[in-house]
Image (spheres, rainbow, N blue to C red):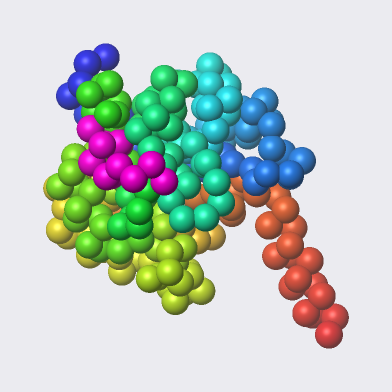
Amino acid sequence: MSGPTRRNTVLDRLRGALIVSCQAYPGEPMRDPDTMRRVALAARDGGAAGIRAQGLEDVRAIRGALDLPLIGLWKDGAEGVYITPTARHALAVLESGADVVALDATDRPRPDGRPLSASIAAVRAAGGLVMADVSTYEEGVRAAALGAHLVGTTLSGYTPATYDRKAAGPDLDLVERLAGALDVPVVAEGRIHSPAQAVRALERGAHAVVVGTAITHPTTLTGWFAAALADGRV
């Protein structure tokens, strides 16, 4: 499938839909490509229109199992810019089978010293799509201007400039502001923990909604229930 056709097909399939993030953290029992493949299949059967996955092996495993639009990323490190931090990482994700490469598009310095534009240009030249994970309005505007095909609110609340937003649930104000300003689709992602919040994201202008923890992370879900019961006993 060629450039514009591929882009339009992927974006149309995701319009107004749910994307499920299938990821596990290092050291967790579910941190295994075949487990994430099975989680992705379960999400598809539940109605997910797309999958977001981390790691080259996970992307390959999921790509081989289903034909939903696949957003891939590669987390390398644990601080600063570590979501698909360089053009090398981005191209590896694309070559592993992702339709869309998600990358950190914040204004923080990248580990190889190269600009964000280099990663976006590399993916575009290779025929892939780019999802820019941002934390602020200004970052979203810049990413779109540099050629990102989608802009996600993924990192709002997770950068020093936006830590104060983390406790407030999903940043729907940022979704609405970006959706009103950009010509590219805006994806709502980050701390969406209920169907009602997902619906509100679409009402505020999101093209699609990514949900991860509330669907695919049993450790966190168990913790919510355990903490509530413990509070109730007190």
Say which residue appears at 65% left-offset and 46% top-offset: 25
Say which residue appears at 26% left-offset and 58% top-offset: 139
Q: Is residue 6 left or right of residue 54?
A: left
Say which residue appears at 45% left-offset and 72% top-offset: 163
Q: Is residue 177 left or right of residue 97?
A: left
Magenta residue check for 115: yes
Q: Which quadrant of the view contains residue 113?
A: top left
Q: Which of 186 and 121 lies nearest the eye of the viewer?
A: 121
Q: Residue furthest front?
A: 113
**Horizontal and vertical percent position of residue 198:** 43, 56
Magenta residue check for 127: no
Please state, as top left, top right, bottom left or bottom right, where the C terminus lies in the image: bottom right
Residue 230 visible in rendering: yes
131 up-or-down from 92: above or below: below
Q: Which of 136 and 230 lies nearest the eye of the viewer?
A: 136
**Horizontal and vertical percent position of residue 151:** 29, 48
**Horizontal and vertical percent position of residue 127:** 26, 22
56 up-or-down from 131: above or below: above
Residue 153 visible in rendering: no
195 up-or-down from 96: above or below: below
**Horizontal and vertical percent position of residue 229:** 80, 72
Range drawn in magenta: 111-121
